[in-house]
């Protein structure tokens, strides 16, 4: 059977993955054999999410009624039910739910009544708390079918330490990255000297290590020195897979969905207030603004090197009529020709404009010329993929260390 749980946390605390890890242990104690635990990321643009919009799915063998009772009791005990926007959902199904619901929850938006109708049709046990919104994520988790997958080891703090400063040795995290990259990633941001895997929010997570296998994340974890964790759990997950991206066309984009779009740069990149960089992308039928926001740091410097006529593919979420860039493929760059007044053949001085349509004139000797001096500027950007740094990467975005979009990953 599959157990799905979602929406148990709040900005002030708790974490659905922590509740899932505790639940796995409670099930085991009750004689229900846990076979796999999944961390299922859903559409990152859902406005009701707390942090990373994660649900949990536990595959196990045993009595569904017993599992349902244990799961509901644990949600009653640990979920942040006093917070208005926390609306947990618990689902127990004797088989995987239809994967179409999972796919829609990752790439689009689902309604509560859709989730309830699906659960009733499939004969699942379910409980929705308060407005029942968590049933969407819980049902999606129970319906999850990963075409590509990665793993994450999450270490959780002992309850007595929640809300206090985390004690994780910085150098040990860099050592873990150095010893296990590229089989682990987003542990640190080397370019900017930042630790990425340790959160700053008041939840139970101590740190998380992402990688391409359970062995890789466990190896990296072995290098990390920290306060004693309460429990640890390795999850199978859709993180780092680009599962949220849809192949799209300019002019046919839905607010809150995430796309891969091909087109041509139609305007020079412009740096606006706050350091955000934008340019227009067109496909002959329409155009859309693409944004590289300030937190993407040096990625903006790459975007600034684009020029009208360059052919690119962009990946990112469509929000407020803009594509918020996660990565970009430069397929072809146009030659850039610089023109300026020619030098006088007689005296070597650079001429000046003689007026619109009148060519150029030497101020020294009066000679004239009709043609400007032309030179091809060597482009500073090469064809290939470019991505935001680890410190700005979304959970679902596939890092290039795993290969570009469309590259074959882990098939399950």
Image: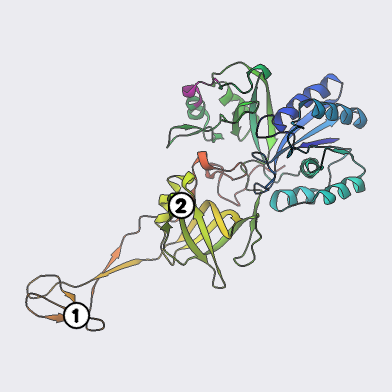
Element carrying mark 1? loop
Magenta span? 167-173
Q: Is residue 382 visible?
A: no
> Magenta segment: does it hold 348?
no
Q: Are marks 1 and 2 in contact (CB under 8 Å)?
A: no
Viewport quadrant of the N terminus: top right
As displayed, is residue 194 above or below residue 350? above
Q: Nearer the viewer, residue 5 or 64?
A: 5
Q: Position of residue 168 (x, y in %)?
A: 53, 21
Q: Nearer the viewer, residue 220 or 300?
A: 300
Q: Nearer the viewer, residue 369 or 162?
A: 162
As displayed, is residue 298 above or below residue 179? below
| Count of numbered circles on the image | 2
Residue at x-position 77% and y-position 41%: 141
Q: Position of residue 38 (x, y in %)?
A: 73, 35
Viewport quadrant of the C terminus: top right
Q: Position of residue 283 (x, y in %)?
A: 54, 69
Determine which of the numbered discs, if any, sits on residue 354 in the image: 1
**Label 1 packing within 10 angstroms: few (<14), some (14-19), many (20+):** some
Determine which of the numbered discs, if any, sits on residue 276 in the image: 2
């Amino acid at each position: 059977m599959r157990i799905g749980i979602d929406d148990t946390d709040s900005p002030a605390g708790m974490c659905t993955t922590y509740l899932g890890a505790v639940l796995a242990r409670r099930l085991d104690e009750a004689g229900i054999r846990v076979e796999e635990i999944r961390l299922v990321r859903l559409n990152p643009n859902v406005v009701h999410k707390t942090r990373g919009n994660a649900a949990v799915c536990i595959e196990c063998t045993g009595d569904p009624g017993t599992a349902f009772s244990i799961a509901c009791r644990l949600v009653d005990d640990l979920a942040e039910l006093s917070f208005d926007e926390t609306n947990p959902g618990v689902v127990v199904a004797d088989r995987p739910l239809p994967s179409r619901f999972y796919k829609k929850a990752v790439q689009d938006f689902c309604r509560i009544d859709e989730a309830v109708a699906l659960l009733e049709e499939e004969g699942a046990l379910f409980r929705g708390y308060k407005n029942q919104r968590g049933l969407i994520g819980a049902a999606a988790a129970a319906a999850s079918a990963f075409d590509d997958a990665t793993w994450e080891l999450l270490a959780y703090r002992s309850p007595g330490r929640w809300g206090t400063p985390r004690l994780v040795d910085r150098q040990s995290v860099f050592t873990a990255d150095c010893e296990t990259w590229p089989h682990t990633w987003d542990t640190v941001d080397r370019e900017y000297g930042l630790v990425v895997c340790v959160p700053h929010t008041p939840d139970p997570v101590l740190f998380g290590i992402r990688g391409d296998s359970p062995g890789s994340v466990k190896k990296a974890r072995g290098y990390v020195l920290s306060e004693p964790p309460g429990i640890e759990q390795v999850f199978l997950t859709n993180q780092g897979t680009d599962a949220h991206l849809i192949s799209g066309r300019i002019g046919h984009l839905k607010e809150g969905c995430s796309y891969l779009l091909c087109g041509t740069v139609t305007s020079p990149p412009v740096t606006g207030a706050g350091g955000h960089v934008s340019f227009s992308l067109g496909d002959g039928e329409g155009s859309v603004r693409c944004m590289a926001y300030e937190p993407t740091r040096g990625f903006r410097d790459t975007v600034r090197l684009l020029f009208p006529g360059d052919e690119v593919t962009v990946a990112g979420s469509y929000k407020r009529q803009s594509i918020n860039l996660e990565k970009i493929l430069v397929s072809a760059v146009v030659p850039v020709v610089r023109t300026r007044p020619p030098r006088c053949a007689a005296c070597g001085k650079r001429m000046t404009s003689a007026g619109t349509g009148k060519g150029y004139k030497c101020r020294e000797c009066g000679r004239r010329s009709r043609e400007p001096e032309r030179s091809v500027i060597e482009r500073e950007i090469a064809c290939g993929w470019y991505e935001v740094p680890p410190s700005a990467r979304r959970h679902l975005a596939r890092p290039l260390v795993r290969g570009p979009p469309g590259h074959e990953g882990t098939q399950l």
